[in-house]
Image: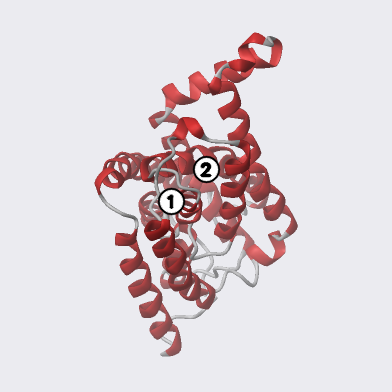
Amino acid sequence: MSGAIGYGDSILLGIVEGLTEFLPVSSTGHLTVAESLLGKQTDNEAVTAFTVIIQFGAIVATFLYFRRDIVRLLAAWARGLFAAEARTNPDYRFAWYVIAGSIPVVIAGVLFKPLITGPLRNLWVVAAALVLWSAVMYVAEGRSRQKYEEEELTLRAALLIGLFQCAALIPGVSRSAATISGGLLLDYKRVAATRLSFFLAIPALTGASLYELKDVDTSVVGWGPLIVGTLVSFGVAYATIAWLLRFVVRHPITIFVWYRVAAGILLGLLLAAGTISPT
């Protein structure tokens, strides 16, 4: 397999990343499949680094889309650090809860990095995770009482949703599918759970992207294709965020279950037939 990623590859992978990062269908799973179809060695550290870094484009799209919320939360958090009275502001507590909810995935990511970037970067894992986590999404949507708003987030709920986010380290699960499912199972409204998923994505994916910069190998992935892939990811992700937040107002996340199951089964059949390689 050729490992090099050119401009055409980076554009295609940027589109895949932007479309799938925030939809509950697994961006890592789709990128792993796309890289395999493009003839890339999916367990190559440089290819893995490219995958993580172009996610930063999607994160920048989140920064831009939620800029007013982010500025408000950061301002409340900063004021609360220096003034006791400001700590009564719900935004101050919410900001801390987002930070706390991001800690589990950081710890898990560091502890299990060799497993995540090695054996788990396997398309059999992706196929199984696409199907199996769909059952969690189905149960979460069906059992949720959807009675809590975003403003009612508690530290306990933030930590539990953060633990759900750890499942997304398995390619095929989907970070948004994991966190939205966690929010629904804790009885948060669908829109609230989706917005919480975005807020938890910011520290987790920003940190991961910056950490992976050290593994960039310009003989495999040049800075040009890396920048292009990130810019494409940004544009597509911004449009996807806007669409998803409108979509979940009226539609359950179980709509994505059928796609995930079909994609997982199809991928399994392709692997079994030897049409594509699992790594």
Q: Residue 186: horizontal and vertical position, in percent?
A: 50, 49
239 or 92: nearer the eye?
A: 92
CA distance separating discs 2 and 1: 10 Å
Question: Which of the 4 quarters of the picture holds residue 108?
Answer: bottom right
Residue located 61% across and 55% down the image = 166
35 or 107: nearer the eye?
A: 107
Question: Which of the 4 quarters of the picture holds residue 44?
Answer: bottom right
279 or 164: nearer the eye?
A: 164
Mark linked to residue 21: 1
Residue ID for mark 2:
201
Name the residue type under label 1. Answer: Glu
Q: Are marks 2 and 1 in contact (CB under 8 Å)?
A: yes
Name the residue type under label 2. Answer: Ala
> Furthest residue to the bottom?
273
Q: Residue 47: horizontal and vertical position, in percent?
A: 56, 60
Q: Residue 243: horizontal and vertical position, in percent?
A: 28, 43
Note whether 6 is above or below 211 in the view shown. below
Question: Which of the 4 quarters of the picture holds residue 242?
Answer: top left
Residue located 49% across and 75% down the image = 128
Note whether 242 is above or below 112 in the view shown. above
Q: Residue 7: horizontal and vertical position, in percent?
A: 41, 53
